[in-house]
Amino acid sequence: MQLAVRGHADAPAEVLFALIADGATWPSWTPIDSFTLEKPGHEGGESVGAIRVFRTGRITSREQIVEIEPGRRLSYILLSGLPLRDYRATVDLAPNGRGTTIRWRSTFRPRIPGTGWIYRRALRRFIQRCVDGLAAHVARDAKGDGVATSR
């Protein structure tokens, strides 16, 4: 199964990428409650190979960064946390005349046959909240409302 969510932010791609690449900022612009870096990546920190742990309510998901194109793309796979197989998400940032287009795509297979539509609907809603939250976060920062990039 696959899904794609789009959004727009009135900020340069590099600003958005800095937030996406720093898991500690996610609780400030997504529905996620907390973040922990379980294992640094091959080049340290949140580089390729890093394992990031996100908690949302009672759900704890472990994700591994598998691709980074600074300022443009971050891809990760789900290691555990949801009953899904082969989950991979890619966040692409494309500068346009007025800011940046955000495209967040996911592919997966449900572990339990017949449940894919439920997860696609829930993930689409969750990812849309992430995209909208990212755009709103940088808009607040641009206005100087004192919103920190990290909790």
Image (cartoon, rainbow, N blue to C red):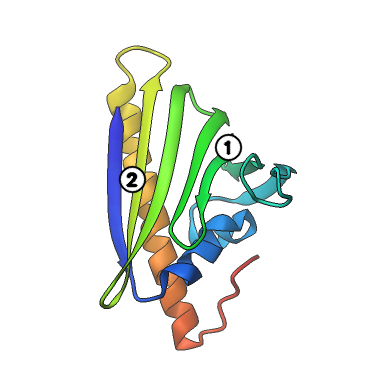
Image spot of residue 141 (x, y percent): 49, 80
Give the mark count: 2
Q: Residue 125 carries which label?
A: 2
Between disc 1 and disc 2, the foreground one is: 1
Query: Can residue 58 be seen in the rendering of this structure?
Result: no
Left or right: residue 141 versus residue 7 is right
Image spot of residue 135 (x, y percent): 39, 67
* Inter-mark Cα distance, 1 to 2: 19 Å
Left or right: residue 50 versus residue 118 is right
> Does 120 sit above or below residue 83?
below
**Residue nearest the viewer, comparing 58 with 41:** 41
Image spot of residue 83 (x, y percent): 48, 22
Helix, strand or loop at label 1? It is: strand
Residue 79: quarter of image: top right
**Residue at the location (65% across, 65% down)?**
151
Look at label 1 and name its amino acid: Glu
**Residue at the location (36% across, 49% down)?**
104
Query: Can residue 79 be seen in the rendering of this structure?
Result: yes
Query: Which residue in the structure is indicated by mark 1?
Result: 63
